[in-house]
Image (spheres, grey):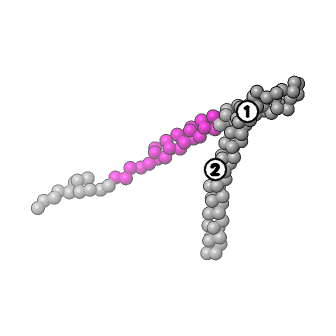
Amino acid sequence: MEYARSVRKMRNRLRLKKEYIAPTMAAILLLVILLAILFVTFEMHHECEGENCPTCELIIKCNRFIKEISSSILIITIIAIVFFINYYKETFSQTEYIKKESLVSLNIKLLN
């Protein structure tokens, strides 16, 4: 009995951790994307030092990061949509309609 309780508590803790990890990671990713966009926006017209300018290199890296993240987010979104469509198709196709018995379906005559 004690073992079962401890296992349930551990599962609840892990479930809570998973519930907080995904939104936290999503918020961090959005923050990084926002900071990259702001950096590119504000530093686009900087005073370039010529060849091997560190600001230009950072702008190129930020642009590449934004393009890669946006394409991967698009792919992940498409995969998620396909997954949910398939999941709900299976769920609704396996649903059995419960036939409720009534006096009419049992062919019982009600005579007074």
The residue at 11%/61% (across/down) is 112
Q: Is residue 65 visible?
A: no
Give the dominant element type of the magenta stretch: helix, strand or loop: helix
The image shows residue 95 at horizontal and vertical percentages of 44, 48
The image shows residue 11 at horizontal and vertical percentages of 64, 63
Q: Residue furthest front?
A: 47
Any mark on residue 97, and which? Answer: none
Hey, which quadrant is residue 15 in on the image? bottom right
Q: Between residues 76 and 111, which one lies in front from this camera angle?
A: 76
Q: Between residues 31 and 6, which one lies in front from this camera angle?
A: 31
The image shows residue 28 at horizontal and vertical percentages of 69, 46
Q: Which residues are magenta?
A: 74-99
Q: Secondary structure at mark 1?
A: helix
Dot 2 amino acid type: Pro
Dot 1 amino acid type: Phe
Q: Residue furthest left?
A: 112
Q: Which residue is mark 2?
A: 23
